[in-house]
Image (cartoon, rainbow, N blue to C red):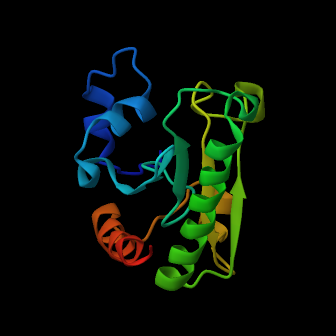
Amino acid sequence: MKHLYSPWRMKYILENKGKKCVFCVKQEDTNDAKHFILRRGEYSYVIMNLYPYNSAHLLVVPYKHVSTLQELPDEELTEMMQLVKLSEKVLTKVYKPDGFNIGMNIGEAAGAGIAEHLHVHIVPRWKGDTNFFTTINGTRVIPEDMKIAYKKLKKVFDEEK
C-alpha cells in the first residue's frame, strides 16, 4: 500500500463547510492573506488555488455568484480578462514559466469542481513538469509552500497597478 501524506487537508476535511459557496465565503472575508487573495477588482478577484494542478495555480473569480459567462455583463467579463492578463504578467515575473494553461470548465460535465460559481484557471507550466511520478502514480508534487508563494506573488501584484 502506498501512502501520500498531506496533513494540511485535515483542516479542510474537518471544517464546517455549510451550504455557502466557497468563493462567496472567501470574498466576503476581508482577511485576504488568510484566503490567499492576491488582488481585488471591482467585479472579481484573483486567488491562489488551494488544490493546485501546479505551483502558483491561480483563479480569477467574479464576485457575482453565476455559473455561466452569459450571466455576466460585458464590463465584468472585461475585468475578469484584465485580471487574467495581470496574473499571467505577475506569474511570468515571479516564476518565469515556459507556458500557461488558461481556461474554464463550465458545468459539472465539463469538469468544473465548483460548477455553481464561474472561475478562470491560470496554471503556469514548465518543460518537464509532468514527470514519471505524475504519469505512473497519478500524483502531482507541488514543490513550494503556499504561504511562501503567496508572499512572493502578493508583493508583485501590489507593485502592479
Residue farthest to the front, as pictured: 75
Q: Looking at the image, which residue is at 70% across and 59% down?
A: 102
Instruction: Indicate the position of residue 71 as horizontal and vertical percent values.
Output: 69, 27
Q: Is residue 139 visible?
A: yes
In the rendered image, the residue lying farthest to the top is 19
In the rendered image, residue 44, in percent from the top left (x then y), is placed at: 50, 45
Q: Is residue 130 placed above or below 36 in the rendered structure? A: below
Residue 14 placement (x, y as % from top left): 26, 27
In the rendered view of the protein, which quadrant contains the C terminus? bottom left
Label tally: 0
Residue 69, quarter of the rendered image: top right
* Residue 161 horizontal side relative to residue 154, left or right: right
Q: In the figure, 159 relative to 104: above or below? A: below
Is residue 138 in sight in this rendering? no
Residue beneath the point at 63% across and 67% down: 85
In this view, the residue in front, 97 or 85, is: 85
Q: Nearer the viewer, residue 44 or 14?
A: 44
Residue 28 relative to residue 49: left or right: left
> 30 above or below 106?
below
Of residues 124 and 92, the one drawn nearer to the viewer in this rendering: 92
